[in-house]
Image: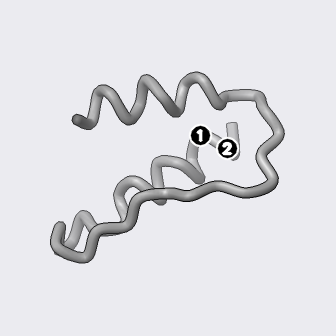
């Protein structure tokens, strides 16, 4: 699942994004924000 998520993030690299829905799953405990943090890291590059 992680690999699929990062594959999709790669498609967004360099594109302007005004609105995004990013996964946040509180059931994942300490990793709940992992998807959101990864998204922001890709957008900063």
Residue 23 horizontal/vertical position (percent): 41, 59
From mark 2 to mark 1, how far is it between C-alphas? 4 Å
Query: Which quarter of the rendered picture does the N terminus lie within?
Result: top left
Q: Nearer the viewer, residue 34 or 8?
A: 8
Crowd around label 1: few <14 · some 14–19 · many ≥20 (10 Å):
some
Query: Residue beneath label 2, please?
Result: 43
The structure residue drawn at horizontal position 29% and vertical position 27%, both measured from the top left corner, is 3
| Residue 3 vertical placement versus 45 (above, below) | above
| Residue 31 vertical placement versus 43 (above, below) | below
Residue 14 horizontal/vertical position (percent): 76, 28
Discs 2, 1 touching: Cβ within 8 Å: yes
Left/right of residue 18 with respect to residue 45 in the rendered view: right
Q: Label 2's element? A: helix
Q: Nearer the viewer, residue 39 or 41?
A: 39
Left/right of residue 25 with respect to residue 9 in the rendered view: left
Query: Residue beneath label 1, please?
Result: 42
């Amino acid at each position: 699942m992680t690999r699929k998520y990062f594959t999709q993030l790669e498609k967004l690299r360099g594109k302007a994004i005004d609105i995004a829905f990013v996964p946040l799953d509180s059931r994942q405990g300490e990793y709940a924000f992992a998807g959101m943090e990864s998204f922001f890291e890709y957008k900063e590059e």
